[in-house]
Structures are given as structure tokens and as C-alpha cells.
Amino acid sequence: MEKLNRDSVQAKRYPERVIQFGEGNFLRAFVDWIIFNMNEKANFNSSVVVVQPIESGMVDMLNEQDGLYHLNLQGIDKGKKADTIQLIDVISRGLNPYTQFEEYMKLAENPDMRFVISNTTEAGITFRAEDKFEDKPAGSYPGKLTQLLYHRFKTFDGDQKKGFIIFPCELIFHNGTELKKCIEQYIAHWKLGDEFKNWFENSCGVYSTLVDRIVPGYPKDNIDEILSKVGVEDKLVVKGEIFHLWVIEAPESIAKEFPADKAGLNVLFVPSEKPYHERKVTLLNGPHTVLSPVAYLAGLDLVREAVEHPVVGQYVRKVMFEELLPTLDLPKEELEQFADDVLDRFRNPFVKHFVTSIMLNSFPKFKTRDLPGLKMYLERMGKLPVGLVLGLAAICVYYKGGKRGKEVITPNDDKEIIDLLQRLWKTNDPEKVAQGVLGSEYIWGEDLNKIPGLTEELAKDIKSIQEKGMMKTTEEIIKNQEN
């Protein structure tokens, strides 16, 4: 079988207009795929130069394949199974700034360069006081980027039209704000001057973004099947789900330069990413957190099984559409469409998503993902959301430990939380367990026993799960709500 490169397959070439920090699976399955579609459908006419953000990485492997690789997208698309394989041809080359610093800096000299995109992990956006401007390169991503920006400023003599549009994709809230702060710290720390600082402020835009696509990565389980279809040896095949969303907090002028809408892509330019961040956390992560212990204690192992189950599936829909969705402030139609998309993602037949993998640190997850919705529902509806309370009760019972059939239940969380639950469960009293959990300021930062009716409702659900089992308790709660 021939090796994948630009001699063995037909691939297009485009002008280099995008610098991408990071060569990992996510960027190649998400950002580069989006650029591929904009080239094909919106005449974006741009290729990507990949910069390896750390000393060891994959750019050598990428260069061996001339920047080419195949993307296998799988999932549910408009109610039907979809399984596609595409050759992605937008990466022109990869650079390692640790061994190719001069080549890296020359990127700033290209007058056509316009965009900088990154995913250097959450730890990548950081300021390191030990970094020096003379380092080749600086240790942190913001330091490397500041070096590049300064060289561009000098090369083009402060030309206001030669600034960069910068889209960080790191999974932290307000990633653009945080990256900009770091760059400003380096400008001050390295004493790069007010002229450069003003050029950066006025000519460059650093925009916060929210990214969403599940990317399992290299498909070890069926790589032979994929390679037989594409007919070449590809060491960089990447697998991702069909669903994609990129929310960018930027003005319309930026959207015109990055024409994702003309390519029919789910890329939104918005005044604030906050409601979309809240939407994802509330309607995707929130249901995940409570469906997992409910499903597990009901004898189910996969997210897909939970969503498709006649009882647990109803529970999941109730939590999403009746309890969490009304707590958000985006248009109802938009929220319902997102929730439907989430259910399709949960049902993805190509992904084995074990509920036990979601139950790591369940109490902190409930605090950030579900507790705000519980409080808002109570405020808006004047009653407690019974599905969310049941989910919290299931977490409490799961943390009791013991066995499910022959399988030993081993909760995984902060030691202080595990110790607390063990002490509470020694009483074998659902009321004391409920009071103790809700009263733990270590978990919640407050005493949740003060929420009207919550202690009694939680204790009742814990008792029911203990006496009747998870499935019967869930079924009764759903039936009681219907009557």
C-alpha cells in the first residue's frame, strides 16, 4: 500500500493564511475540517501552517504525509446513521519552533497571514515569568505568540492592517480574555514598548470561543477497514462525531473574514459566548451527570442504552426538556434544537460511552452543572425539579459503594468527600445521609439544607432507591409527574 502524500493522492494547495498552534486530534478533526469546508464551499482559499507548541510532538509525522490525513466522521445526522471518510488537505506544513525557530519567526513576515488558532490544552494559556524574550522559543504558548506578534509589528513597521485575528480553542471560559491578559503581561515583562502595545490592542483581535465536538482520535478498532477504503497508508487518521459547534465572541466584521456560514457550518459569531457556554454545560454536561448514576444503578452501562431505555430514556428527556431547558434564557426553539442534537450524540451507535467514566467527581460536577439549574427551576417554577433531585439521590446511593450484581461499586472523588459519605452511610439513615450531604460546605460552599423542601425530597428518594431499587423509583417518579 502506498504511503499518503501529495504524490500518491490528488490534493489542493492554497495560500498560507492560518497559523495553528497544535497538531493534535481535536484541531485536525474540528478546525482544519471547518477550514476544509470553507475552502470547498466559500472560497476561503487558505491553508494552515501547524506550529508544534511543545518540544516533542507530531509535526514530523505530519510532514511525512505532506500535511494530509483522513477524517472519519460518525454519528446520527438528522435521525439517520452517518459514516463518512474525507481527505483533509488544508495543512501545508508543520514547524517545530524548538528546532526551526527562524522558520517559525518567518511566518510573521508573510503579508497574507491573518489568523492564529490554538488548542494547547487548558494549561497552555499561562504566563511564565522565567520566559525571556531572547529564548528560541519562549516556553509558553502566549510567550511564543508574543514573540511572533512583535516580529510582525517590526517587519511591517507597525502597519495597522497587518494585525492577526486570534481564535483560542482551549477549554476554559473566556479563553480569549485569558490569552490576551497573558500577552499583555509578556509585553510589560519584556518591556516591548507602548508602540507595540498599542499596535496589538488596535490591530489584533483575541476572541473568546467555545468549541464542541467529541473526537475519539485514532480509530485503532477499525483502522484496517478504513485504510482498505482509502487505499493508502495513513498514520494520522482521526475519528470524530458528526456534531460540531464553534461559538465565537466577535463582531460581524470578523465573521465576514471567516465565512463559515456560507459553508453551511455550525459556527456562530455572537456578542457573548456566555449563554452558549451555559447552554452546553446545562443541556449536555448536566444531563450526563445525573443520567449516569441513575442508569448505572438501574443496570445499564452505556449512555446510549440509557437514552434508548423506555424508563431511563424518559427520565433523561424529562431532566433535559422539562427541568433544565426552562432555566436558560436563549430562544426556546434554539434550545430545543440543541437538546435534540445532544440526544442524537448520546445515541451515537459508533461510540461506547460508559456511564462509569462520567461518574468521576460526581459531587463537584453536580455543583457546577446541575445545582444552578435546580435553584433557577425552583425560583421560576416555585417547586423542586424532581428529576434533578433523583439524580443527586442516585449519586448519594452510588457513593455508598457495595456491589451491583457481582460488580464492586468504587466511587472516585476527593478523599474528603469519599470519607464523608462513608461516615454518613454508617448510620444507614436516609435522612441523616441527605442532611449530611446537603450540609457539607466543603462540597457546595453553602448549606443546601436551607433550600426549601430539598432535604426531605432527597431523603425520600434515597430511601426509595434503597427499598424499591433504581428502576422502580425512576418509573414511579415519571408516572407521578404525568398524573
Image: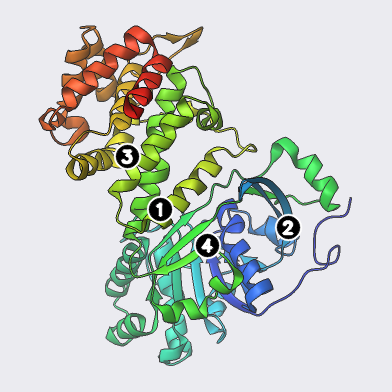
Q: CA distance from mark 1 to mark 4?
A: 14 Å
Q: Which residue is mark 3?
A: 323
The number of numbered discs placed on residues in the rendered structure image is 4
Q: Considering only order in the chain, which callout, 3 or 4, is on the residue closer to the N terminus?
A: 4
Q: Earlier in the sequence, mark 2 or mark 4?
A: 2
Residue 91 x/y as whole percent:
66, 67
Identify residue for label 2.
86
Instruction: Give the distance between the C-alpha atoms of the residues marked 1 and 3, in whole angstroms.
Output: 13 Å
What amino acid does circle 3 point to?
Glu
**Residue beneath disc 1:** 335
- The residue at 15%/31% (across/down) is 448
Please say if 442 is above or below 199: above
Q: Mark 4 is on which residue type?
A: Asn
- Circle 4 is placed at which residue position? 266
Q: Quadrant of residue 460?
A: top left
Horizontal side of 363 relative to 107 (left or right) equals: left
